[in-house]
Amino acid sequence: MLKFKFLLWMLTQLLQRQIKTNPDCARYVAGKDLVFQIRTEAGVGRTFFLRDGAIRSVAGLVDQPRFTFSFKDAGTGFATLSAKDSQGAFLRALGNQDLVIHGDFLEVMWFQRLTAFLQPPKKPSPYERTAF
């Protein structure tokens, strides 16, 4: 449970850093007003607020977020959110119904693109040609 809570807190920190240091990320969130939450079925979770080009979060849940990711349990949430193959893990969790999404799917898609800013830059393959 603690690892899940810590991971959600860290998500806020990592997104804050990207917004401050990555101009593309800052442009992506500019003007966005969004409240969402990531939680377990048991009700443990965190609410995220995106407003005025900044993100913050608080422990606990609100009544009417724009969308909610609800994991079966904290272990499943941690494993899914911290997986190296994040997109595959996310899709498997949805397929197994270990993750249920409620709310505005357009906002979910927007959030998925936001999390792409957290991925490390792709290293070129040694087999790719480079321009001289």
Image (spheres, grey):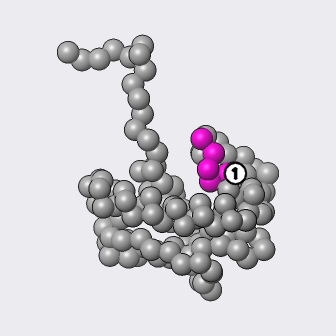
Residue at far bottom of view: 63
What residue appears at the point 29 percent right and 56 percent down from the top-left corner? 21
Residue at far front of view: 2
Q: Residues within 10 Å of mark 1 (few under 14, many from 20)?
A: some
Check residue 80 for magenta coloring.
Answer: yes
In this image, 33 relative to 100: left or right?
A: left
Quadrant location of the C terminus?
top left
Residue 51 is drawn in which quadrant? bottom left
Quadrant location of the N terminus?
bottom right
Residue 123 vertical placement versus 87 (above, below):
above
Asked if residue 69 can be seen in this view, the reply is no
Residue 60 vertical placement versus 19 (above, below):
below
Residue named by callout 1: 79
What residue appears at the point 31 percent right and 67 percent down from the top-left corner? 30
Residue range corresponding to the magenta coloring: 79-84
The percent position of residue 25, horizontal first and vertical second, equals: 34, 56
In this image, 89 relative to 72: left or right?
A: left
Residue 96 vertical placement versus 38 (above, below):
above
Q: Name the amino acid, label 1.
A: Ala
What residue appears at the point 41 percent right and 71 percent down from the top-left corner? 55
Q: Give the total number of marks visible in the rendering.
A: 1
Residue at far left of view: 132
The percent position of residue 125, horizontal first and vertical second, equals: 43, 20
The percent position of residue 11, horizontal first and vertical second, equals: 51, 61
Circle 1: element type = helix
Asked if residue 122 can be seen in this view, the reply is yes
The percent position of residue 41, horizontal first and vertical second, equals: 77, 71
What residue appears at the point 74 percent right and 56 percent down from the top-left corner? 76
Check residue 41 for magenta coloring.
Answer: no
